[in-house]
Amino acid sequence: MTELKRNGSSEFYALLDEMGKLHDKKLHDYASNSDPFGNYYFAGKLSKLFDNPDDSGFIGRLGEKLYRLANLENGNKVPANESIYDTETDICVIVTLWIASRRNRRYKDQQNLKIDFAKKQQAEYNQARLGQAEQGISHQPQLYSCESCLTKFTSNGPIFHFIPGYKYLYFCSQSCKDAHLNRIKDK
C-alpha cells in the first residue's frame, strides 16, 4: 500500500491517528460496526422523554452508559476501555447528580413562589394603605417587633414576609429580613 503524502503539520496527523485509535477502543465498547452511531441515537431518543433540557442532558448521558453496558454484555465483549464496574458506577453517579439537580430546581421554584407571594402581599398592603390615605383615613403608627433583631419599631409600612399556613413576619429592614430568611433556609 502506498503511503499518502500529507501536507502541513505532522503533529496534526499524529493527533488524528491518536484520536482514531481511541475511537476504535470506544466504538468497541459503546457501539458496533453494524451500528456505529447506535449509542447516540439511543441517547437522543431517551433525552426526548423530558421537555426540560436540564433533564434531557442527564438522560442523554445515562442513555450512552446504558447502551454501552448492553452492548458489552449482550455481545459478550471484554471492555477495551473502562470496566463494566466503572460503567455501573457512572450510571449511579449520573442518576444521583440528576436527582440533586432536580431537587435543587424544585427548591428554587418553591423559593420563587414564596417571594412572588410575599411581593404580591406587600403590593396589596401598600395599595390598601395608599387607598386609605387618599380617602383621608390616617393611621396611628403600629408597634412591631423585628423577627430578626427583636428591635421594637413603629412604621406605617413595615417590611414583611408571609409564610403560607403560618403567619406574617415583620422586619425593621431588608437586611434583617434577608438574614432571618437565610437562617431559616440553612436549617
Image (spheres, grey):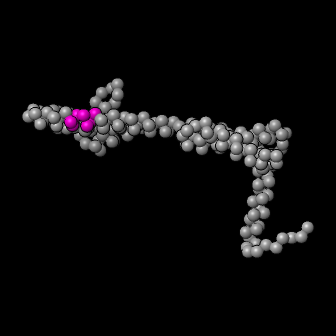
Q: Is residue 134 left or right of residue 24?
A: left
Occupied quadrant, residue 98:
top right
Total numbered badges shown on the rendered structure: 0
Occupied quadrant, residue 163:
top left
Main secondary structure along the magenta-highlighted residues: helix
Residue 19 at x, y percent in the picture: 75, 59
The C terminus sits in image quarter:
top left
Residue 42 at x, y percent in the picture: 70, 41
Residue drawn at the location 21% of the way across and 36% of the way down: 127
Report if residue 144 lies within the magenta region: no
Q: Is residue 85 visible?
A: no
The single residue placed furthest to the right in the displayed view is 1
Q: Which residues are magenta?
A: 121-127
Q: Is residue 135 left or right of residue 182?
A: left
Residue 59 at x, y percent in the picture: 62, 40
The single residue placed furthest to the top in the displayed view is 165
In the figure, 80 relative to 180: above or below? below
Q: Is residue 41 visible?
A: yes
Q: Is residue 185 left or right of residue 67?
A: left
Residue drawn at the location 72% of the way across and 44% of the way down: 39
Q: Nearer the viewer, residue 80 or 137?
A: 137
The N terminus sits in image quarter:
bottom right
Residue drawn at the location 28% of the way across and 43% of the way down: 174
Occupied quadrant, residue 111:
top left
Residue 126 at x, y percent in the picture: 21, 37
The single residue placed furthest to the left in the displayed view is 136
Q: Nearer the viewer, residue 153 or 83?
A: 83
Q: Is residue 80 left or right of residue 142?
A: right
Residue drawn at the location 33% of the way across and 41% of the way down: 179
